[in-house]
Image: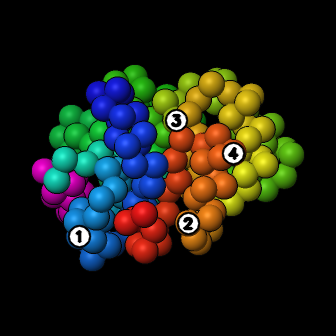
Amino acid sequence: MKEIIFERVGENPIIAAVQNEADLEIAIKSQIKTIFLLRADIFNIKSFVDKIKQADKSVFIHIDFLEGIGRDAKAIEYIAQMVRPDGIISTKSSHIKLAKEKGMFTIQRFFLIDNQSYNMTIKSVESTHPDMIEIMPGVIPGVINRITKKLNTPVIAGGLIDNKQDIIEILKAGALAASTGKKELWEL
């Protein structure tokens, strides 16, 4: 499964960051190969995941924002066994560790605001070993370049990405992909 995920991201390094059902429909019809579900709840998550998979796209659930389901080991086990996304996204190392134990593909999200958060990101990745990391805001190519040189973990850049040039700079800096909620960029 990991190979397929990396292949899809390699084919199209733009990831749709979806926050509502209307945008989900647009993302499914677009050329993108990977979707981050940033907002969902216990009632719609399974149907959203199934719809995305039927469109032959990879789907990742941001479990920190998933409403109506706890954030403990049983919740992650339920997501892995019943919802069956391609993987999860979380800012929490404990969620990443639990999901990895369940055999899920993991993306850990980090917000970089200063040198301390940069250093904590490096330590956390070396400790939790997520399959990928997402760096936010994504429009900091110099920092993305430093991280990609320091870690072997593939990097996704997300947040504040506004145009094609931002994506080009992010990819030049060494990121594997860029996640964006800006629908106009899903068709690049």
Task: Reply above or below: 104 against 40.
Answer: above
Which residue ends up furthest to the right in the rendered image?
Answer: 115
**Relative to residue 146, is residue 155 drawn left or right?**
left
Q: Mark 4 points at which residue?
A: 173
Residue type at mark 1: give it.
Glu
Q: Name the residue under label 2.
A: 164
Q: In which quarter of the image is residue 14?
A: bottom left
Q: Quadrant of residue 136?
A: bottom right
Please name whichever residue, 32 or 48, is drawn nearer the observer in this view of the structure: 32
The x and y percentages for residue 175 are 60, 43
Q: How crowded is mark 2: few (under 14 residues within 10 Å), some or many (20 or more)?
A: few
- Give whichever of discs 2 and 1 has the lower sequence position: 1
**Relative to residue 114, is residue 9 drawn left or right?**
left
Query: How far is the residue under mark 1 from the one under mark 4?
Result: 31 Å
Q: Residue at x 72, y 37 (%)?
A: 147
Q: Name the residue under label 1.
A: 25
Query: How far is the residue under mark 2 from the one under mark 4?
Result: 14 Å
Please name whichever residue, 40 or 146, is drawn nearer the observer in this view of the structure: 146
- Give whichever of discs 1 and 4 has the lower sequence position: 1
Q: What stretch is highlighted in magenta?
A: 41-54
The x and y percentages for residue 107 are 49, 40
**Looking at the rendered structure, which numbered label has been put on residue 132?**
3
**Relative to residue 15, is residue 140 drawn left or right?**
right
